[in-house]
Image: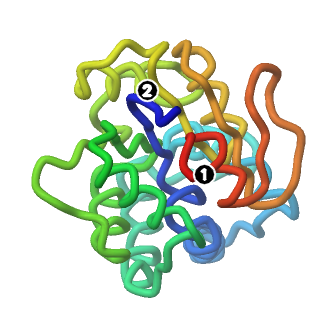
Amino acid sequence: MTQKAVFWDMDGTLVDSEPLHEAALVAALHSVGIPPPSNLHQRVLGVAAWPVYEMLREEFGLDLPFDDWIVRKYDHYLPMAETLVPRPGAIEIFNELRALGVEQAVVSNSDRLIVDANLRAVGLSYPGMKTISRNDVREGKPHPEPFLRAAWLAGVDPTQAVAVDDSRTGAMAGLAAGMKTIFWPEAPMEGPPGAIVINSAEELRAELGLK
């Protein structure tokens, strides 16, 4: 059965942007003389900008004010955004669900600036499209608020919606919102308890009831 609503994470789920985020973060760290830790990717995957900043400040001595730091990172990221490509199969599924009239939204822990730039880069932008950025909520993922806001905007009960996310942080948010949660990591890994773990677009199609 096709779902009533599907809410998508953006970075790593709809668009293959995680390598760009990591490259921008590494470049910004080098620019302030901080060697990036070897486990940087695992530590920041799916995490919003402010908690990452706090971690860098507390553990690595970053001493820039947040606004100066985030400008530095985005100055590296935004020129690269034009090179973004979709995650294979994801946008095709998004467009198929849209044609079927399924309510959808993009639910991201990224700032509005990044959400809009990324979606434009891969051609996923249309009038009335529902998008939730970190700037639109009080609490980011893993708090359920971003996915709950998506349900409110779509006019559906959270229990009638599906959350699709590539990070454990995002999957935890979908579960906390009471949604069927599909964990689609970029590399195979164990998901949070209660999430449905998949490893391909074909598996995603099956879980969403598409033939």
The residue lying toward the viewer, choosing from 200 and 11, is: 200
- Residue at 39% x, 58% y is 96
Q: CA distance from mark 1 to mark 2?
A: 21 Å
- Dividing the picture into quadrants, the one containing residue 182 is top right
Which dot, 1 or 2, sits closer to the camera? Answer: 1
- Residue at 44% x, 37% y is 6
**For marks 1 and 2 on the same chain, the one whose residue lies earlier in the sequence:** 2
Can residue 56 be seen in this snapshot?
A: no
**Residue type, mark 2 in image:** Phe
Give residue 180's position: percent from left, percent from top.
60, 24
Q: Is residue 65 above or below residue 18?
A: above
| Mark 2 element type | helix
Q: Residues within 10 Å of mark 2 (few under 14, many from 20)?
A: many
User: Is 152 placed left or right of 73 in the picture?
Assistant: left
User: Is 179 placed left or right of 81 in the picture?
Assistant: right
Which mark, by number, is residue 147? 2
Give residue 151's position: percent from left, percent from top.
34, 22
The residue lying toward the viewer, choosing from 79 and 122, is: 122
Give residue 145's position: percent from left, percent from top.
42, 20
- Residue at 61% x, 53% y is 62
Q: Is residue 86 above or below residue 55?
A: below
Can residue 25 be seen in this snapshot?
A: yes
| Mark 1 element type | helix
Per the image, the residue denoted by label 1 is 205
- Residue at 37% x, 12% y is 157
- Dividing the picture into quadrants, the one containing residue 164 is top right
